[in-house]
Amino acid sequence: MSLSTGRTFSYYPITGIIKRWSSIGEEDREERALKKLEAGVRTVAPEQAVDIVPFVATLMGLTLHGKHAERMKNVSGDSLAKLIAKNLRYLLAVTGRGKTLLVVVEDLHWADESSLEMLKLLVPVAANHPVMFLFNFRPEYAETTESFHADLLEQYAELCVDIELSALTADQSRTLTGNLFKAKGIHKRITEQIVERSWGNPFFIEEVVRSFIDLGYLENTEKGFVVAGDLENISISNSINEVIMARVDSLDTQMRSLLRVASVIGRSFFHLSAGCENIPGQTRRTGISRAVGRTGKEDGYVLLEKR
């Protein structure tokens, strides 16, 4: 996964995949992270671990000591990048041995240049091993995925399949809206207004449904959602920004303060204290998930607090 801030973090989507694969948490210090990485590599390539670990760890920005530091002496520049790619390709190949390995990179249009260059060096592993890359990105990002996409098609056309996702049709939008609501008593006018203003964007539809829940118009029961408020006179926002801001405005003062501080830090952070001294710790830990309408690791959010 790439983030909107990903262009300022070298190799962010790649290191994120490695961390998840080796169960490295955001709270793990360097020493523990290195041990987890080494343990993960040894499970799939025990004999080659001594060569693979220092190069992958270097990509991740981990400090090396002892034999690993010795292995990296006099390795730099282009040779370093090529050796990192070589060891990553080998790691992908052995991890996928006996099964198909799917490597998913979402929101690639936010990726930094170094990540895109490294990914191009990794793609060839799919030619001879059961490894599949799934790159998800928006069109018309000339500086990142437009050139990345063109390079892949030029160099590895036989390995590439393009799947272009278009906007939902009106009928598809109605189906999605109905599936998300699953509540009796939703006036047809409300559904049609959502469909009309969504312009086929499923994210808009999802956010509208979430806003209805947050604002108390829909209530989740054992039998599914039921209408709990007056939807007859509700006004549907014209944009995603308006929908989200309406949800933010519905939060209490503490939640708005918490969200304001978190938005400055970004999506991934270890602790949240500055500007939130008057907000109880439990509120901090649960408040962001409520505010953004997501929980834990879903949708790329990493919301942790050191204890």
Image (cartoon, rainbow, N blue to C red):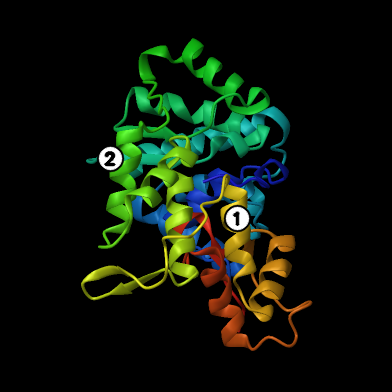
Which one is earlier in the sequence, the residue at label 1 or at label 2?
1
Q: Is residue 112 visible?
A: yes
Q: Relative to 110, does residue 64 appear above or below in the rendering?
A: below
Figure label count: 2
User: How far from the left and from the top, in percent, is residue 268?
Assistant: 62, 61
Q: Toward the viewer: 113 or 163? A: 163
Q: Which residue is mark 1?
A: 67
Label 2: few (<14), some (14–19) or many (≥20) C-alpha neighbours in 10 Å:
some
Point out the frontmost of discs 1 and 2.
Answer: 2
Residue at the right extreme, as displayed: 275
User: How far from the left and from the top, in percent, is residue 139?
Assistant: 55, 26
The quarter holding residue 161 reads top left
**Residue for point 73% across, 80% down:** 276
Q: Relative to 39, does residue 101 appear above or below in the rendering?
A: above
Local SS, label 2: loop
Label 1: few (<14), some (14–19) or many (≥20) C-alpha neighbours in 10 Å:
few
Q: Relative to 301, does residue 32 appear above or below in the rendering?
A: below
Give the residue type that dot 1 points to: Lys
User: How far from the left and from the top, in percent, is residue 237?
Assistant: 56, 50
User: How far from the left and from the top, in percent, is residue 148?
Assistant: 57, 23
On residue 97, which mark appears? 2
**Residue for point 64% across, 70% down:** 270
**Residue for point 73% across, 88% down:** 278
Residues at badges 1 and 2 in contact (C-beta under 8 Å)? no
**Residue for point 32% across, 24% down:** 128
Give the residue type that dot 2 points to: Arg
User: How far separated are the C-alphas under marks 1 and 2?
Assistant: 28 Å
